[in-house]
Amino acid sequence: MDRKTYTFDEAFKASLDYFTGDELAAKVWVNKYALKDAFGNIYEESPNDMHHRLASEIARVEKKYPNPLSEQELFDLFDHFRYIVPQGSPMTGIGNDYQIASLSNCFVIGLDGQADSYGAIIRIDEEQVQLMKRRGGVGHDLSHIRPKGSPVKNSALTSTGLVPFMERYSNSTREVAQDGRRGALMLSVSIKHPDSEAFIDAKMTEGKVTGANVSVKIDDDFMNAAVNGGTYKQQYPIDSDSPVYVKDIDASGLWKKIIHNAWKSAEPGVLFWDTILRESVPDCYADLGFRTVSTNPCGEIPLCPYDSCRLLAINLYSYVVNPFTPDAYFDYDLFKKHVGLAQRIMDDIIDLESEKIEMILAKIDSDPESMEVRQTERHLWEKIQRKTLQGRRTGVGITAEGDMIAALGLRYGTEEATDCAELIQKTLALAAYRSSVMLAKERGAFEIFDAKREEKNPFINRLREADPALYEDMLKYGRRNIACLTIAPTGTTSLMTQTTSGIEPVFLPVYKRRRKVNPNDSEARVDFVDETGDAFEEYIVFHHKFVTWMQANGYSASKKYTQEEVEELVAKSPYYKATSNDVDWLQKVRMQGRIQKWVDHSISVTINLPADVTEDVRRTLAELHNRGYKLALGSSSKNAKFILEKVQLLDAFDAISDGTNITKSKPDPEVFLRAAEFLGEKPEDCYVVEDAYAGIDAAKSAGMQAVGIGIAAGYAAADVKIQSFGELLTLGA
């Protein structure tokens, strides 16, 4: 039977109505989640069709078990992304017979035993590629690869170390594009590995390892040495009692390099590995194949080899009754009920995943290649299916934490808000584990469940202390799932729930967007022209739940507000001083730590550190002033003055040339020419200090001397090249 298809415009129009005019949400759904075949034919008109698809398939699985949920009950949970939102691969893959792909978002791979050989290294590369072509992100650890210069018994004589293989795996990721979107990869290594410093530095070289996230696994001994200024022993093999290679390093120096590189390039990530292993419930079964070795690309699910994660988010905002009013409260009873159902749905998705793997295996068997070619992929999926069914790992998470806190009248980043967030996550953890215990009673416990193995696990003991009856039932019936909870990033999901993402605060309650216009249209308003000459109109956008706050408090959402009026509105709202840039970073870390106590995997969250300026910069600017130099800041950003105020450097500059007084961005010279004008100086008498190629080009176009720092220090067009800001003081010597 032929299914009805829809054009992009038809699906977009219907989805636009579904999302009440939200263009971004509509485009995201049509582009990423609507049911499609390999030829781009669209088989769903709006998310309503998708939710019926999900409900139908999960209801089919439910019928295999006692007390099944009906299709309508499931649909009501999914409808309008109000309560339960399957994320990523489950949303696109459940009931999708047009694509043969996994329902898992991410995997970790890794061979047993001694895997330091070209055969093992290439085998991992092949497995990585096979998973990425099925829409899976991949993580794997490199600690098994011998360090650079180690002797090998082949014609190469010595090992090349970690970095060349990092590049290989990175390149493979970039080569496997899925609908124009590259795969996702996490590479990790133990800090104990002698090549860990080279691993930490790898992404500092522009153009290298661009297809992978990298994280270093930190142990307690290293952190103690870093804090106390001691030495730390690296060795290979890292877990050997009689290593073949040993060296002592300055732990504090390497820790500072990690911090510097993370500041400079956003990587490496840091995995506090001893803590992960202590807290991990699956690692109670490490000797049975559940030893955690790496994480998924976003870092929120530490996994053993050939296990994977499927994700689902619960929309916290929907449990606030009377939001943004004095009568607002959180409906804990409904929340606990839905958490239990979410855990049940996640267990159903594991059965659906097994069906998908059977389809993948059948596809492999029907491929025309020889078995010699097919066997790696087949064996890979057999291992994944086995691990999936053995542990039945799930990933129930949350989204809309920021909006939920605001709707309750609390301010994100305060102690009161953190108390609330912790209580809600604790409630979720207890409800999810109770559901898993009841599922074990109805459907059977996961295959290797053994309460004795878990009795010293910190997370299980927190559950036992919080709910002794739950623990007694777990001893009696077991548990359906080896682990249940995670908090994943919910970027596109939050666009469709029209809420804040994950446990993040609101980024901005009000912001400006640009819409491209025809500059020849007499009716068009041109507010900005970019470096290519394209013209844009700027308009104000309100965060969805900020609009709800406005309406609840008697403010019109359709009125055209001035900037001053907007700022006054924000100041009256619970979003005031509670944005991503406002929240105290240390308070956010504390909040994350308190929530983490009730998550058996981990949390994906962004910590925005203050834009502190080094003493070198402060000292240099002050000395330049003392020597009589005039100083101007040239930036395309409209937030330049705000940032300078935050770092207490506004008074260091005589003039500011920024996005508020220019129309063209770098490499156009306008920003620097205006700066010279404000200073009352000729362009040829000015120096520009830049860390970007485009900035150097803009300076040269303005007829100024260009000083390259950072990446731009390697740019041939720079007239002067420096390594540190303080070197500016030597230029006139």
Image (cartoon, rainbow, N blue to C red):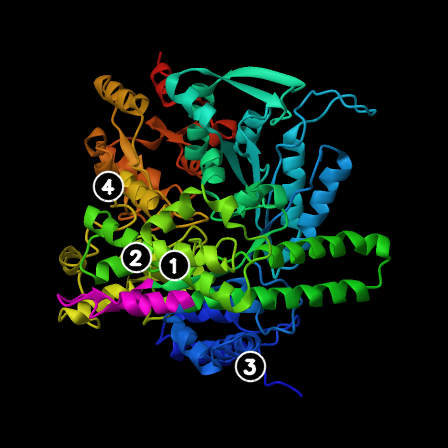
The region drawn magenta spans 316-340
| Disc 3/disc 2 C-alpha distance (Å) | 41 Å
State the mark number for residue 6.
3
Crowd class of label 3 (few under 14; some 14 to 19; many from 20; radius 10 Å):
some
**Local secondary structure at mark 2:** helix
Dot 3 or dot 4, earlier in sequence: 3
Choose mark 3 or mark 2, whichever is in front.
2
State the mark number for residue 424.
2
> Pointer 1: what residue?
398
**With respect to residue 255, does 500 lie above or below?**
below
Looking at the picture, tell me which residue is in the foreground, 322 or 659: 322
- Mark 4–mark 2 contact, CB under 8 Å? no
Dot 3 or dot 2, earlier in sequence: 3
- Mark 2–mark 1 contact, CB under 8 Å? yes
**With respect to residue 512, does 21 lie above or below?**
below
The three-letter code of the residue at mark 3 reads Tyr
| Disc 2/disc 1 C-alpha distance (Å) | 10 Å
Looking at the picture, tell me which residue is in the foreground, 255 or 16: 255
| Disc 4/disc 2 C-alpha distance (Å) | 38 Å
Left or right of residue 338: residue 629 = left
Choose mark 1 or mark 3, whichever is in front.
1
Task: Tell me what residue is drawn at x 67 percent, y 67 percent.
Answer: 100
In the rendered image, is residue 21 in sight?
yes
* Position of residue 645 measured from the top left corner of the image (x, y, whole percent): 21, 38
> Pointer 4: what residue?
641
**With respect to residue 72, does 36 lie above or below?**
above
**Local secondary structure at mark 3:** loop
**Local secondary structure at mark 1:** strand
